[in-house]
Structure formats: C-alpha cells, structure tokens
Amino acid sequence: MSTNQKAHPPKTFFAHQRYKISEDDPSTAPIADLEENWSLQEALKTSAFWILLIGLAAFAMFSTGLFFHLVSMFADRGLDAAVAASVYVPVALAAAVANLGSGYLADRIPLRFLLALGLLFQAGSLVMVQFLQGTGAAFFFGLILGATNGVARTLSSVAWPTFYGRKNLGSIYGFATTAGVVGAALGPIPFGFVRDAVGSYQIVLFTSAGICILLSLLSLTIRKPSLEMN
C-alpha cells in the first residue's frame, strides 16, 4: 500500500444507516430512527393532531362523567352505593393490565388501531352502564371502563412523540394535556343537566357512545404526518 494512501476502517452495514420512524409499522423501526421534530404551530396544522386531541379529550370527558355520576347511575339500576364503590377495584386492576398490554401493542401496531379500540371500549362502557343487572355485571362494567382508561393513558404518553418528535414535546404535550383537563372538567356537566331535565341518563349516554364510535372510525384515517409534505 502506498504511504500516500490513508487507511479507512471498513464500513459496516449499520455504520451509515439512516431511518425514519414508521408509525404504520413500528416493529420494523430501528433504534437509530431519524426523528422529525414538529413545533406546536406546525402540529396544529395537521388533521392527525386534532383527531388525536379530540379522541384523547373524549376519554377524559366521558370517563369523568361516568365516575362523577356512578352512584346515581347505579341507583337507577337498583344497585346501592356500596356496589358502586366496589367497582373501583376492577377498574384499577383492568387499567393496570390494559396499560401494560397497550404499551406492548403500541410498539407493534399502528397507534390509530389502539385509539379506535380504546374509543370502542369507552362506547361500550357508556352503553353497558344503562343495562346493569347485579354485582357481576357491575364488575364487568368496571373492567371495561378500566381497560378504557389504561389504553387512554398509554396513548396520551406515546402518541405525541411518535407523531411529532421529542424536541418540542413540552409545548405539544402541554397543549394536549390542557385539552384533556378541560374535557374532564366539562364531562360531568351534560350528564347532570340531562339527568335533571328528563330524569334519566339515557339520552346523554347513548349520544356520548355514538360520538365515541364516530371518533373510533375517524381515528382509523390517521397517518403519521411528514414535515416534507406539510
């Protein structure tokens, strides 16, 4: 070898690889992902942001409405306050299991499917609470409601950095969290208003379930946005 030539280390396959995060197939995205970092102003211009935001706010709104009026709803079905209080045990257990399970799935399937599934669970809980018969049914309702909360908790943590990167995560997550807090604060109001107006939760529960089903279908249209295409 000529003394004028410089020795170079061999280039391995991984030395110069660059990848993009693929929300559609997260299981194939290597650790060395090339991340797109969006500002809050840029994220606000994408439809995916608003579908995620409204979907996650719906979890907060409707779950809080159920929890706030749970004793009254159970009383309408002939179940006393002690049964309503005991339902929080399966809620907590199901939330913990769903948190683990949905976290595992979030690494392997597109997040839009998790959002759609969670919203269907939420719709199911809103319908189911109107037809409870006995303690067993009440506990099953608690499991569905807990699973809803577990999925929602996972999504609220992983969706924003997956779709919009980590550099400006504080402002994006702060905006989304504010929407969730507002949703939770407003959630019990329509439930109580309808109950006082017509003497039943049925209208608001079916309406809320319908909204969740529509949001579930809409969530299936979500795709990870690209700064290059925006």
Image (cartoon, grey):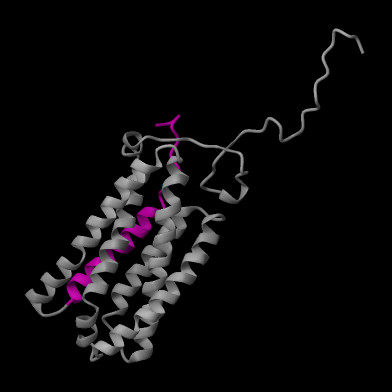
Q: Nearer the viewer, residue 186 or 27?
A: 186
Q: Position of residue 32 (x, y in %)?
A: 61, 39
On whether residue 226 falls in the magenta region, the answer is yes
* Residue at screen point 30% across, 46% down: 175
Q: Is residue 223 visible?
A: no
The quadrant the N terminus occupies is top right
* Residue at screen point 8% across, 76% down: 196
Residue at the right extreme of this rendering: 1
Please identify the quarter of the rendering in which residue 187 is found.
bottom left
Find the magenta span and give its range: 201-230
Please identify the quarter of the rendering in which residue 56 is found.
bottom left
Q: Position of residue 168 (x, y in %)?
A: 40, 38
Q: State left or right for residue 29 relative to residue 188.
A: right
Q: Main secondary structure of the magenta part?
A: helix
Taking 1 as reference, is 46 above or below it? below
On whether residue 102 falls in the magenta region, the answer is no
Residue at the top extreme of this rendering: 4
Please identify the quarter of the rendering in which residue 38 is found.
top left
Taking 142 as reference, is 21 above or below it? above
Q: Position of residue 216 (x, y in %)?
A: 36, 59
* Residue at screen point 35% across, 79% down: 88
